[in-house]
Amino acid sequence: MPADVVKDEDVAVRMRDGVTLRLNLYRPAGAEGPLPVLLSAHPYRKDALPELKRGKWSINPQFRIMNQPEPLRISDQTSWEAPDPVWWAQHGYAVANLDTRGGGRSEGRGDLLSDQEADDIAQVIAWLAGQSWSNGRVGMLGVSYLALSQYKVAALNPPALKAICPWEGFTDAYRDFFTPGGVVENGFARVWLAITKRAARLTTDLSKERRAHPLRDESWKGLAPDLGSIAVPMLVCTSFSDANLHSVGSMRAFQEVASSERHAYAHRGPKWATFYGAEALKHQLAFFDKHLRELDVPTLPPLRLEIRDRRDHIVEVRDEAEWPLARTEWRQLHLGARGALSESPTASGQVTFDLKRDAAAFEFRFTDDTEVSGPMAVRLQVSTRGAADPRLFVGVEKRANGLPVPFEGSYGYGRDHVAQGRLRLALREPDAHSAPHRPEHALDAATAVRDGEVMDVQIALSSSATLFRSGESIRLLVGGRYLQPRNPLFGHFPTHYAPSSSGRATLSWSEDAPAYLEIPVVPKA
């Protein structure tokens, strides 16, 4: 930490119920104020900082267990998922890094994603705004849990909270992370639950709760923020490279908050290199300079959209007004014989595959350069035999010269599909409140899956912004288990979705019962 930044450790903030929370506070040296304030709040221990040991830096284990495909630069005061307080202090901000209730040096016992946590943070915001060195305007910034902790407090609309920047944060713990499509994720979720249990003293054991509440009941709904109550200006990162964790939920936040000033930063780069990179910091600084400093800076576009044609090549970055794009042409690519996808309905047919071992594949070749930007979805006619609690996993990949084209994904291995989705067939009943082109499922009641019964199901896939060049193909994969390997050297470690355990599935199509992949084509200007 350089000499031009001052750090106050374990600053105490007393809650109205008598519990004391503690934060580390960073300010520009010699600055009397008034200063705008950035707050990050999490259970991961604010003092878990990089350490210099025998001439080498030791950083957070989560940085080390997941591949980092690009270098990044942070100060030694940067805790896990938090903004670099030195960088922000050198740009004229006070930065508060808070241990939430039960975490680190804060007292009490906490509950993750709870209303209590939001109320605590609102009290800390009021305290920060009332300090002599503060200008009374507070913003929130951080990644993952440090993004999740922003939504509920923003929905309370505390007067001093003037802007939030949730950088990649899901909004529905059940749908987006623990049990997407009703399929249990027991890889990274187990890692995360173990980390939070070790880092914080918690009242509720979410490991036990998810086993006690396998369906999306009221307990899960209670963890989700009321996005429609959020009116504060928001800059949300809605990356396309975090579909196993945050991509779907962060885009939901952009679409559903009530904020009149809402902005999205959409990319498909590595998570940490992007967050701490120059382009993202430029966006974050402009956003907070406007709303916390009230400077006359240009307003950010509603959506900064990055289009790629492969993992490491950005084709275009442009400003857009909404998501999905209003000018989108929604096209249906119909399943057909011999693994073909067709723009027109095809003759009746079917394909059968083993749910444990195989997948069905269908491919369409583009004859012109085509931008596919937006959410995708599939409609399938599926029946199963000999299957106990079957699940379907859907992936969309790009192929060129007969080989898959890789993209950046949640865990940094650069072999991701363009888009993905999944569904436990017993939870196939649709949600009546689904938005167009985003079919969701209620996930609150199971319906029996009978041998041979043809089920008409729709599965939403994650969003993307991808250019397919003339001669390249889009390929649809449908299987009974996750479509990526878990190998820690080249797979999607540590993610793991509970697979189908047995049986065979048949996909069928006909004029009366169509099956197709819906893609969002952006017309050329």
Image (cartoon, grey):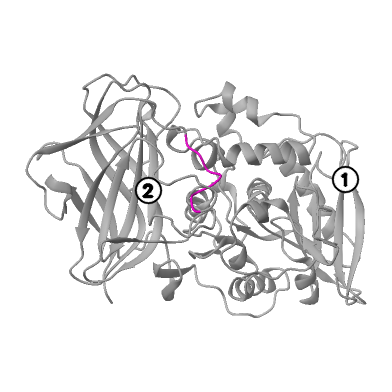
The residue located at (79%, 60%) in the rendering is 50
Q: What element carries label 2?
A: strand
Tell me if residue 317 is in the magenta stretch: no
The residue located at (54%, 37%) in the rendering is 178
Which quadrant of the figure contains the N terminus? bottom right
Percent coordinates x, y for residue 142 in the rendering: 68, 58
The residue located at (49%, 39%) in the rendering is 175
Q: Camera-side residue: 432 or 361?
A: 361
Q: Quadrant of residue 464?
A: bottom left
The reply, left or right, for residue 473 in relation to residue 120 is left
Q: In which quarter of the image is residue 433?
A: top left
Which quadrant of the figure contains the C terminus? bottom left
**Amino acid type of the residue that numbered disc 1 sits on in the rendered structure:** Arg
- What residue did someone put label 1 on? 105
Q: Camera-side residue: 162 or 195?
A: 195
Q: Are marks 2 and 1 in contact (CB under 8 Å)?
A: no
Tell me if residue 496 is in the magenta stretch: yes
- What residue did someone put label 2 on? 461
Q: Indicate which disc, 2 or 1, sits on the residue closer to the N terminus.
A: 1
Q: How many labels does the image show?
A: 2
Q: What element carries label 1?
A: loop
Percent coordinates x, y for residue 318 in the rendering: 43, 75
The reply, left or right, for residue 131 in relation to residue 305 is right
Residue at the limit of the structure toward the left, as seen here: 347
Which label sits on residue 496? Answer: none
Can you see residue 521? yes
Q: Give the range drawn in magenta.
A: 490-497
**Amino acid type of the residue that numbered disc 2 sits on in the rendered structure:** Leu
